[in-house]
Image (tube, rainbow, N blue to C red):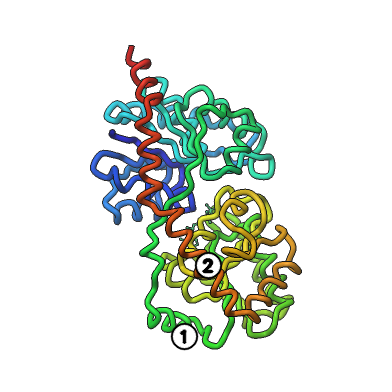
Amino acid sequence: MKILFLDQSGKPGGAELCLLDIAKPYSDRCLVGLFADGSFKDLLQQNQIPVEVLTTGQIQVRKQSSLAQGLGSLGQLVPLIAKVVQKAHNYDIIYANTQKALVVGALASVFSRRPLIYHLHDILSSEHFSQTNRRIAVTSANRCASLVITNSLASKAAFIAAGGRPEITEVVYNGFDPKIYHSHESEVSQMRQQLGLDGQFVVGHFSRLAPWKGQHILIEALAQCPREVTVILVGDALFGEQDYVQELHNQVTALGLENRVKFLGFRSDIPLLMAACDLVAHTSTSPEPFGRVIVEAMLSARCVVAAKAGGAIELVEHGINGFLVTPGDPQELAQVMTTCLKEKENTAVIANHARATASQRFDVTNINQQIAQLLNKKFVIRNYLNYEL
Ligand code: UDP
């Protein structure tokens, strides 16, 4: 089966890193079409996955765009859709990995008579998307997609609540290669030394810097923790959230935490950095659609404390393979951080249990098999044949 993957982003966010793993088995018979140039293209090339940037002009529609703004971008989209239609003739399936990719892929699937798969990595709720955007996504998926893959039960529920068709929707979690998350002790201690973390209880936060990812909640919690607790913030503002980055720096200064918070920027050595932590914090203030960092922490055998909402609830069992706290509550988070510092043995037991179960549950080979089975399912083929008749 030849697949034309579509993704709007030039930067490697969670959806893109997930796509990288999905595309790998198809590297000899797929193309990833991107709507922006950037480091994600380089990452795909490093992994020998064919990639082409299909447009260089930025598509002006944003998550909170109105109908007028959406319509205003149509002129920009027409040449892109034409290009995708032309490409799609060489592939069996169009696989849209983001919302703009869905809109372009939906129209291209009609004109090229190729079935459309939509991989939904978002919670389609008012917290994340304007009503117009939600309507466009749901209508495009309902009318044109043979299959909608959602990255969690939470994403599925939000899609259906927004009017999405349940009968075309299947949940598939993100897959990971557990081997990548086994770091050598010597490398880990070298990394801790390099970062000046020796003797500290290190709490890591791994995410792009954006208000809803809640880095400010972690900084506030840190101010209530013993002095040996240090925070590393790994990630950068990927989508223009520079004001928030400045606010975080101001907050650190205002709380006198300059020596206890390190901003490491975007990094590609996540497994080693996770291994250099004692605890990983996930602090999203709005429901997280899946939460790759939560699973990555588990695979690294590092205890994780996550905000209790969205996909995180499906990943973490409180006190069994991690901890759950009320989103946006720094006091509760500080309590868990302090408990983990004081009860290191229990924390290690939880972390080891998490690694063992996550290695099975999220193994990329099994997850890719699930996706292959769904793609091969009769209804996709039947749809394709219907188109051909
Ligand atoms: N990540 C990364 N470098 C960074 C920060 C984050 O590679 O500096 C990765 C992180 O390891 C995870 C992904 O980005 O795999 C973020 O995915 P998640 O589902 O947590 O959030 P999303 O970006 O999809 O909202």
Most extreme residue toward the left is: 28
Horizontal side of 201 relative to 266 (left or right) equals right
- Amino acid type at image mark 1: Gln
Ligand 1 is within 8 Å of the C-beta of the residue at disc 2: yes
The crowd level at tag 2 (other Cα within 10 Å; few <14, some 14-19, many 20+) is: many
Horizontal side of 195 relative to 134 (left or right) equals left
Confirm whether residue 243 shows in the render: no
> Residue at coordinates 35% horizontally, 50% vertically from top-left?
365
- Element class at badge 1: helix
> Residue at coordinates 49% horizontally, 52% vertically from top-left?
14
Q: In terms of image quadrants, where is residue 312?
A: bottom right
Where the N terminus falls, by quadrant? top left
Residue 259 is situated, as x and y percent measured from the top left of the image, at 62, 83
Residue 73 is situated, as x and y percent measured from the top left of the image, at 53, 32
- Element class at badge 2: strand
Horizontal side of 285 relative to 27 (left or right) equals right
| Res 234 label | 2
- Amino acid type at image mark 2: Val
In front here: 141 or 68?
141
Cα gap from disc 1 to disc 2, whole angstroms: 17 Å
In the image, residue 58 above or below residue 48: above
Confirm whether residue 231 shows in the render: yes
Residue 194 is situated, as x and y percent measured from the top left of the image, at 45, 83
Residue bearing the label numbered 1: 193
Whichever of labels 1 and 2 marks the residue nearer the N terminus, that label is 1
